[in-house]
Every structure is written in structure tokens, then in C-alpha cells.
Amino acid sequence: MRKKIKIRFYGATGEVGRSCFVFEKEKTIGVEAGIKLGKNIEFPTIEEKPEILLISHSHLDHVGFIPHLKHNYNIIATKPTRELMPVILSDYARISGFEFNANDIIKRTKIKEFGEKFRVNGFGIELFNAGHILGSAMIKVEDVLYTADFNARGSRILESAKPVKCSTLIIESTYGGREDIIPPLKEELAKLCNIIEETVKRGGIVLIPSFAIGRAQEILIALEAFMRSKRIPKVPIYIDGMIKKAMRIYRMNVIYAKKDLQNQILMSLHDPFLSDFFKVSRHIDRKDVKKPSIIVTTSGMLTGGPVYKYLKLFGEDENSTLVFVGYQAEGTPGRDILEGKRVIRIDEEEKEIKMRIERIKISGHSDRNDLIRFINTIKPSKVILVHGEKDKMKELEEDLISKYDVIAPKLGEEIEV
């Protein structure tokens, strides 16, 4: 008889952020150690000290708590995740002021590949491509599949995540609400091209705040292709924040990307990661950035970082456009602006935003239809919803409850599977 697994939930319950879970059989393993960014940084409520930590991918809501771990632990992740973690955590150190040794985290991380079956602490484990960012993994622990953040559609860089049979499915619900239907990528990129054309004609700046890892690379590869094909005007594309370093890591790990992108680089046909269109500001206040141009910079939710320097310079320019391309969490300045607020606090000063505000629905996550299709393909006996706002999670639960045993765990709850 198979021994039951206890799963404890220390974050990502009714919220997007601070993913952190512990699996227990005879021994324990930790899965994720994230934080939640908003008006304040929120940490997972975990007090346990698992010696093994499985990490799905290198975004702060999945890895940001790692520098705060004081016990002896080891990490298991894919190669791109290991190399990208120090990039995102260095950004976190700058935002939070918390000092730590990024090299220590690299040394603690053991690489596992997709499809490689292995055992740790008595658990059989396998990683599968999640299609979210380079190296992102769905994690199967025994007969429990944890999707983490996953994209069932694929993107310009990554192949889509494929369903994996399991009896218990722990699935994200970031876009689980009934209104959360993401349009086809081609349509949204066409909309972005039109916004760029119109803004450049007005002589303005197109400012695109983005997550350093994942969204930025997708946007930049698309912009490079559109500029090369003359779909958009040839203007400088400035890259700022940790995005440039992440671009180098993406290029060095292109074997994890789509075959056609691999072939472009490996056969020297064209290297979009090293495009002449990409520029870097050499001025501490970014005053060498001239209009018209495109800027892709951190932070994606306007919680700090280089984007503030550009908002200082161009925030009051009515000919410029601020384009959101990623999820804006509750309590963040980005969410406030999307909901109509037009004042942002920068360096203790109130700054009015007069730029045009646009939103492009480009996502590394699965939307509501993708989530339901994914679940219906797997047909698990139990569905556990995590990583979603309460109202969206509730709407998804209501549409699944007639067919599945659905659980939306509370913070600190333990579920036996």
C-alpha cells in the first residue's frame, strides 16, 4: 500500500506570491521558497527547515526567500534556473537592502534535467518543461504534479507545457478568473507594434516595465524581429536593469529554447540576443536616452529599480506611452496605475504620470481556458489550487467542483494525498 504524502502550504494560498510548500512522507522535502512583493515584502510562514529544496524557476515569488534561509540546505533545479537565480536575487538585494552571498546559492544547487527521474529523501521526482521562462519546471513528486507557473501555449522562445498524468494536481490559478482570457500572442504583438508606431510618430518614448527574466526576453526577441522586418520604425531599444545579464544567460542556455531559435544561433544564421538595435544607457540618470526610442526595463510592477529613472524623465510627457506587459499584483504601483491612479511616489516625491497608459496581454502563464483544458486532459482525482487571487481562485473552483475534488488550501493548512 502506497504511503500517504502530507503537503503543507506556507504561501501562495489565495494570493499570487510567496510560493512555499513542504512534502512529508518518512522525510520531508521543500518545494519553492518565494516572497510576495507589494506595498511590503511578505515572507512565507514556514518554520520547518527542509534539507532539500526543489525550485521550479527563478522568479522572486518562487526563490526570493532563499537568502533568508539559515539552516543547511541544498537546492535541486534545472541549469538555467541555477544560473538565473543569482540575477533575480541580486535585484532583490538591491531593492530590500538584504545582503547575502549569491555564490553560496549556486554552490548549493544541483542540476537536474527535464525527464530525468531521480530520488531524494525517499521521494521519486521528475521535472517537466513548464514553458514559463527558460528552464522553468513542473515538478512531479511521486504521483503529485505541481505545475508551478506554466504556459500551455508556448511562446516565441519556449515550447508549451504538456499535461502529465497524476492522481493529485497542484495547479496555479493566476489567470483562473472567468474574465481571464488571454488573446492570441500574434494579436497582442500586433497591438504593441501599433502603439510603438503611433508613439514614435509623436516623437515619444515607449516605456515597457518588465520582469527581468522571461517577459523581457520574449518582448525583446519580438521587437528585434519586427524592427528587422521593418514592421516597426528603427529606433534604439534600450535595455536596463538585470535584463541584459539575463539575456546573456538565455543565449548561453539556448538549448532549452525552441529548435528554430537554437538553429538560428548555432548555425550562425542570425543571433537576436546580440542585435545591434539593443542599446544600454551610459548615464546614471539615463539622460543620454533620447526620444523617440523604446525602453525595456525592470521593475515590471513599478516597485522600484531603473523604471523610476525613466518615469522621472518622461513620466509627464503626454507624447510618450507606458506599456504594461505583465501581471500587476495587488498593492503594487503598477496595479494602481492600471486601475486609474496617475500619481506615483519616487524618492519621497509625488510624480504625476501623464504618459498614455496601455496594457498588452502577453503572459507566460496559462489563461482560464488553458487551465481547464489542462486539468480535463489529466483528469486527476484531486485538484489543489494555488498561486491565485482569492476571487479568481473561487471562480475557477466553482467551474471544476462538479467533476473534481477541488481544494483551495488556507495558509498553513496540511492536506494528505
Image (cartoon, rainbow, N blue to C red):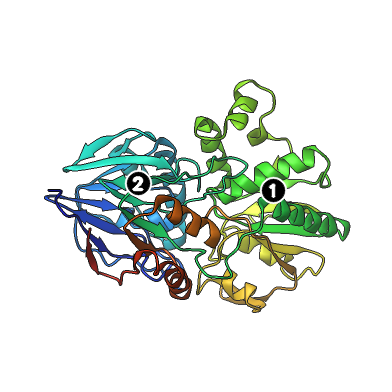
- Determine which of the numbered discs, if any, sits on residue 36 in the image: none
Depth check, front residue: 277 or 156: 156
Depth check, front residue: 136 or 152: 152
**Which residue sits at x=38%, y=48%?**
56
- Amino acid type of disc 1? Tyr
Depth check, front residue: 274 or 149: 149
Which residue position holds label 1? 238
Quarter of the C terminus within the rendering: bottom left
Q: Is residue 204 left or right of residue 168?
A: right
* Residue 329, x across and y down, in percent: 51, 68
SS at circle 1: strand
* Residue 408, x across and y down, in percent: 35, 69
Q: Is residue 227 left or right of residue 309?
A: right
* Residue 413, x across and y down, in percent: 24, 69
Extreme-right residue of the structure: 201
* Residue 32, x across and y down, in percent: 33, 53
Report if residue 406 is visible in the image. Answer: yes
Residue 173 picture quarter:
bottom left
Q: Compared with residue 416, is residue 349 higher up or lower down, i.e. above or below? A: below
Q: Compared with residue 391, is residue 312 higher up or lower down, i.e. above or below? A: above
Which residue position holds label 2? 139
Query: Which badge, 2 or 1, is on the more N-terminal residue?
Result: 2
- Amino acid type of disc 2? Ile
Q: Is residue 133 left or right of residue 138?
A: right
